[in-house]
Image (cartoon, rainbow, N blue to C red):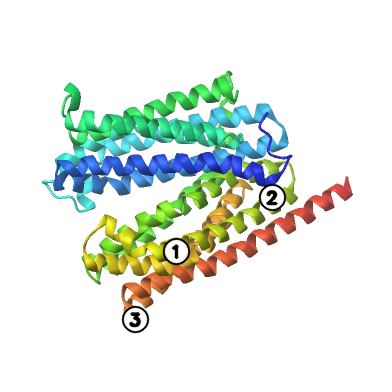
Amino acid sequence: MARNLTAGPVGPQLVKLTLPMVWGLFALIAFNLVDTYFVGQLGTAQLAAMSFTFPVVLTLGNLAFGLGVGTTSVIARAIGEGDIRRVQRFTTNSLTLALTAVFLFASIGLFTIDPLFKALGAGPDILPFIREYMQIWYFGIVFLVVPMVGNSAIRGAGNTLTPSIIMTVAAGTNILLDPLLINGALGFPRLELQGAALATVIARAVSLVAALLVLRFKENLLSTQIPDIRETLWCWRDILTVGLPAAAASMITPISIGVITSFLASHGATAVAAFGLASRVESLALIAVMALAASMGPFVGQNWGAQQIGRVRQALSQGYRFCFGWGLLMAVLLGLGAQSLAAIFNPDPMVIAIASRYLWLVPVSYGAAGILQVTSSAFNAMGKPMPSIIITATHMVGCYIPLAYLGGRIAGPTGIFVAAAIANLCVGFGAYGWSRKTCLQQMKTVSAEAVRS
């Protein structure tokens, strides 16, 4: 409650919220890359097995993300309303909701490993490796979901530095344990793929303990009372009202990217490789925008709850200007260095040529892509999840996929990349207009209530 975001200069507060998130996101990307590197050294079969697990891991990660978005939204708005007891109830019950979801999905997952991954196309040579990895991963899923929800609660209180430190410590732990447990360095047992899963579970366990300690002793956000069943259920309802649509919206993007990849596959494996390479470069280029979008959650939530709509408009306006400026900077830098960047990752001249085309065309729309992310985060923070899911679905399913299909038929991979830029620009400007209209309507509502009272 001491970290109130409803007063003081808006710009500096957004900067203080965003900078730690940049580092936290970078740490997560780094440990995923290191994980992939060490597993790749074991052999093609092991790397393929880990690749087969990505859809399942991503799906459950998106579930945790959705619960986290719902948690940030309800806690930030409760803080804005000044109700500390309600904040503690929401925080405590968000963790009980996460534990319930973990028990359910881990139970289902452990009994469906073979049929699920056979359905995804895994052969008998790959299944044993998948089984090794997922049996450990499912048992450790509590260490994935609960810390994500706990860190979201901390961010909802306006503290983005501590979650970033926790994410960095977890990433460092994972990076340290990978060579020890996968390769058996320094006298540790060589566990290979099981070692990769175990390293991830241990790293997440560290983040779980840290998140709980911070919530209880630093932020005072956990209630010491035994939760009442009725109270727990209405807390769960409020969290899931935002969380389930947020999870659904986050799942639209990876599914849509799978469709786009299939379009590119018709133009050869080289086009798919180039797309994957350019997408990795893009994820690094957009870290600042992603961090800003995450920071909008606590800021908008607290001010919306306190009915400080003018501060919400100001934050969105400054956020949009940053997105445009950052997008322009990245477009220039990636345009100038496209070929050199692509050559770092792959020496194939065709891969370099196609990836360079992506990095010349798509970054032109990065400013609009940033507006999309910031607006979606703001709507979730307001407790209005449907605009967010409509924006995401319109962007990916309504615009990108149809345009990419037509573009691929007309101009090959280049047409697909142009489609990505057009989709970003069109839906980005639409999201901008929708957020402005929503804020104006809320300001009129607040003014009318003030006159009546």
Expressed as whole percent of the image width and height from the top left, the position of residue 89 reads 60, 28
- Per the image, label 2 sits on a secondary structure element best described as helix
Please name which of the two marks, 1 or 3, marks the residue nearer to the observer: 3
| Lower sequence index among marks 2 and 3 | 2
Which mark is on residue 413? none
Which residue: 16% across, 25% down?
A: 189
State the residue position of label 2. 312
| Lower sequence index among marks 1 and 3 | 1
Q: Reply above or below: 365 against 150.
A: below
Q: Reply above or below: 54 against 1.
A: below
Q: Is residue 116 visible?
A: no
Expressed as whole percent of the image width and height from the top left, the position of residue 23 reads 47, 40
Residue 82 placement, left or right of 265: right
| Lower sequence index among marks 2 and 1 | 2
Q: Using the numbered discs, state the Cα–Cα distance from disc 2 to disc 3 in whole angstroms.
A: 43 Å
State the residue position of label 1. 396
Expressed as whole percent of the image width and height from the top left, the position of residue 276 reads 31, 58
Which residue: 70% across, 38% down?
A: 80
Which residue: 61% across, 62% down?
A: 432
Q: Using the numbered discs, state the Cα–Cα distance from disc 1 to disc 3 in whole angstroms.
A: 20 Å
Q: Residues within 10 Å of mark 3 (few under 14, many from 20)?
A: few
Residue reaching furthest to the bottom:
410
Residue 35 placement, left or right of 164: left
Contact check, label 1 and label 3, Cβ < 8 Å: no
Residue reaching furthest to the left:
125
Amino acid type, callout 1: Met
**Quarter occupied by the N terminus:** top right
Amino acid type, callout 2: Val
